[in-house]
Amino acid sequence: MAPQDATMFWLSARTRNDLFLLYSFADAGVPTDALRAAVAARSARIPDLRVRLREAPGDLAYPSWVPGEFSADQFVEHRSRDWAAVEAALGDLLATAVDARIHPWRLHVFRGVADAPMRGSDEELATVVVLQMSHALADGKRATAIARELFCEDGPGRASWGPSAGVPAAFVAGAELITRLRHSAFLSGVLGAVQIPVGMVKTAIRGYGAYRAQTELALLTEAGEVPPPGPGFAPSAVNKIGPHGVLEHRARMIVCSSEELRVPGRTITVVVLTAVSVALAEYLAAHGEPVDRLGAQVPMALTERSNGLARNNYRSLGVDLFADEPDLRARADRIAAALADRRLRARHPLLSAQDRVTAVTPAPILRRDVDRYPIDAVPDAIAGHTVVSSVYRGPADLSFGGGPVRCTGGFPALGAVMHLTHGVHGLGDTVTVSIHADGAVVPDVDEYANLLRTALREVRAALDR
C-alpha cells in the first residue's frame, strides 16, 4: 500500500473520511434479493471491490491489500420511502465508517423513493443507491471509475449482471494463494522491520532534495515564473470547533440540468464557486458575521503518479473567492484566474519532491506523524472556509436493476476546520450540487441550501449577460 493511502486509513481512526457516492435510478421493480445477488456477481469481477486491508504487526510495514469476498451485509436496504426521509438517513450514513480491514465498501439501497430530485418523470419512483468506500481504497476519481464498473449497462466488452465465466477456478485459486503468501502479516512485518534503516537513509537523502526543491521553487516564485501559493484566510463561524466534534451530519442536493449552469467561456466549477461565494457570504452576514474575504479548498486530481500503486492522487488547492468584488462577472473571472494559478503551481515538478520523501518514509514514522497531527485544532490561517469538490462522472449510461440513472451526488467529509462542504458532480446532462453540513455549526442547512439555489440562478444570469 502506498503511504498516502495508508495515511487515509490511519486518519479514519481519528475522523470520518469515507467517500459517499450517491446515484439515483428509476426503480424498475426488480426484487431486492435479485439486486443483492446481482451486486455480488458483478462486484466479483471488479478487482477494487474484491479486497480488504491487512495491517502489519506493530505497523512495522505499511498495510497491504489482500483478497476479500463479498458479504451479504455489504448490501444494506433502507426503508425510507420519500426524499425527505432519504435526506435524513443520509445524515446518519455520513456519520458512519466502514472498516477496511473487514470490508472497504458497502452499498446502501433505498427502494421506491417518491419525490426524489431527479430529472425524469415527476411520477417516477427512484432507487437511490449510496456507494460508501474507505478513502484508503480510492480517491474521488478512482471511486467514480469503480462505480461505473459496478453500474455500467450491459453491452459489448462490459460485465453482465449474471455469474462470472471464462476464468478457470484453479487459476483463480492459485493466484489468490500467491497473493496471500505475498501479503502475509508476519512476513510483511519482518520485511518492514528489516527495511526501516534503509528507509531512514532514503528519507534523509530525499528530504535534503526536497529542501533544495523548496528553495528553488521559492526563487522561481519570487521571480514571477511560478504563481505564488494560495493566500491564508481567517477562520469563520463555519470553521469553529464544536465541544464534542461533529454531532449531526446533514445532507442536501440541488439537481440542475447542465444548461442551467453552463456559461460560455467559464467552467461549471467556476460558476459554482462564484455561487458559493455569494451564498456563504450571505449566510454568514445573516448570522452576525459579515466577511470581506472567503476561500475554498478545491481538490485537483493529478494525472502523473509519483507512486504507481497509490489509490489517492490529488492535491488540495486554496482558492480565493473574492467576496469583496461586487461585480459577479469580475468575481468569476478573478476566481477562474486564481484557480488556474493554483493548478499551475500544483502541477510544477518541484512540488513532487516532498511526495518522493513520503514514498520512502518508514511506516512507523509516518504512523506516528499521523497520530500526532493536530486535526482537532483550527489554525489562525486556513486554506479555505469550505470545500468544493468537482468531479465529472461521465455519460448517463448507467443502470441498476434495469432502471436508468437519473443523477448523482457526493458529500466531501467534514472535519475540525471544515463544517460545510460541497460536491459538484456531473452525469450526462445533469449537474448536482451537494451540501454536507455539521448541524451544530450550520443549524439551518435548508436556509443555506435555499441561499445557494438562489445564488446559482443569480450567478448564471449575471454571467450570461
Image (cartoon, rainbow, N blue to C red):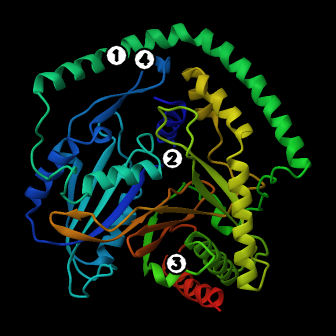
Q: Which residue in the protein does label 2 denote?
A: 15
Between disc 1 and disc 3, the foreground one is 1
Which is more N-terminal, label 2 or label 1? 2
Circle 3: element type: loop
Q: Which mark is residue 444?
A: 3
Which is more N-terminal, label 3 or label 4? 4
Does residue 229 appear left or right of residue 300 in this picture? right
- The structure residue drawn at horizontal position 33% and vertical position 81%, both measured from the top left corner, is 119
Disc 1/disc 4 C-alpha distance (Å): 15 Å
| Residue 96 locus on image (x, y percent) | 38, 52
Of the residues shown, which amino acid type is indicated by label 1?
A: Arg
Circle 3/circle 2 CB separation < 8 Å: no
Disc 1/disc 3 C-alpha distance (Å): 51 Å
Of the residues shown, which amino acid type is indicated by label 4?
A: Pro
Residue 24: name its quadrant: bottom left
Classed neighbour count for the residue bearing mark 4: other residues with Cα under 10 Å, few (<14), some (14–19), many (≥20): some
Q: Which mark is residue 182?
A: 1
Q: Which mark is residue 223?
A: none
Of the residues shown, which amino acid type is indicated by label 3?
A: Asp
Circle 1: element type: helix
- The structure residue drawn at horizontal position 46% and vertical position 10%, both measured from the top left corner, is 191
Q: Which residue in the protein does label 4 denote?
A: 57
